[in-house]
Structure formats: C-alpha cells, structure tokens
Image (cartoon, helix red, strand yellow):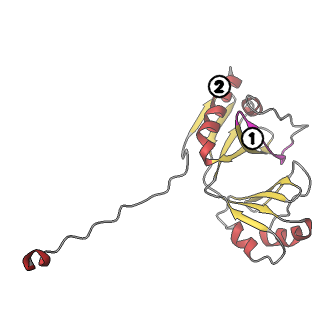
Amino acid sequence: MAKAAAKKTAPVASPSVERRPALAGRSTSATGVKVEVLPPAERISLRAPEASAAALSKALGVTLPKKPKTSASKAGRTALWLGPDEWLVIDDAGKDPLADCATVAALHSAVGISHRNIAISVAGPAAEAAINSGCPQDLSLEAFPVGAASRTILGKAEIVLLRTAADAFRVECWRSFSDYVFTFLSEGARDAAG
C-alpha cells in the first residue's frame, strides 16, 4: 500500500474557455442592403426619475434624451430613450457605463446587459424595406429620422431599433433571439432586393 500511495499523478490541465460573441462575424448582402453582426459593446439598462437625469448625464458624458423616440450620442456612447424613466445606454468605445453610473449618488438603477444583447447593422438603400418585412413601425425618414430610437418587434422578437443614418439602422436584440433576428433580417434583405 505504501508503494501505491507514493506514486504521483500528473497534474490535470485546466480546459481553456473562450467566450465568443453570438453570431460573431456573420453577415449577408443582397442588392441594396447589407446585414451584419456588430462588434461587442458595453450596455446598461438604466432606470431613473427625472430628478436624477442631470447627474447621470454628467457621469455618462452624454445627455439622456427626454422625448419619446429619441437618442443622443457623444464620444462612442449612445443613450436611447425607451420610456419616461428608462434608457438603453450603449458604449462602443470600450468604456464601462455601469462604472460611470456607480459614481452617482442620485436615485437610479443601472444593470449591465452587455452579454444579454447583440447588435446587428442593417445598411443600404433597401434597409428600411428589409426591416419592414417584419416590423410594423413606419420607418420613413419623416416618421423615423436619423437618431430615432424605439423598442418594437421584428417578427416574434422584441428589438430596440436605432436609425444611425438615412440608410442605416442598428438592431439590438437579446442574444437568445439573435439567430432568429439575424435570419429574419437576412431574408427581409433578400426580399427587398427582389
């Protein structure tokens, strides 16, 4: 027995784990429209009363919009109005909006949702038609101008839609619906091109 106890076993190597973003690198193109997954970004779901908006705006470096269907952007950070006391804050510059909100004493709730959401770009002259294949919202420039933002639906999935240019949109969706949303938009792009 002593002989068996003296035998040493080789250490077991730990498996390497790498987090890959949902749909990383996927894109599709059709005549007049391109659908592609955007790089990961930092995001927070922010809730706060109007009295806290100024302090939060200062900490975030972007003025929180106060009107329905609006957004504000500055230095790679965008705040989208989702309700009277609710915003989606997206940071594409690699900074942490959750840490910025932690410095604010004013009443608010900030929850990190960076790994819950993914973003899909829909761009080109047929972008409106591709999205409208499953979204009932009027996306004409008059009704949904550049900078307009809205929580809406695409097919059977909830999305947050931001118009980033006259012919470009950012579609935010939950990671669990990302394959469905990407496929729906890809088919909408092919239909819009036909």
User: For residue 79, what is the image quadrant?
Assistant: bottom right
Callout 1: few (<14), some (14-19), or many (20+) C-alpha neighbours within 10 Å?
many
Vertical order, 109 against 65 (above or below): below
Expressed as whole percent of the image width and height from the top left, the position of residue 82 reads 83, 52
Tag 1 or tag 2, which sits nearer the N-term? 1
Counting the numbered discs, the total is 2
Instruction: Determine the residue positioned at 75% across, 38% down.
Output: 153
Q: Secondary structure at mark 2?
A: helix
Q: Quadrant of the C terminus?
A: top right
Residue 151 part of the magenta-drawn span:
yes
| C-alpha span from label 2 to label 1 | 16 Å
Q: Secondary structure at mark 1?
A: strand
Identity of the amino acid at label 1?
A: Ala
Disc 1 target residue: 168
| 18 or 147: nearer the viewer | 18
Disc 2 target residue: 190
User: For residue 124, what is the image quadrant?
Assistant: top right
Identity of the amino acid at label 2?
A: Arg
Q: Nearer the viewer, mark 2 or mark 1?
A: 2
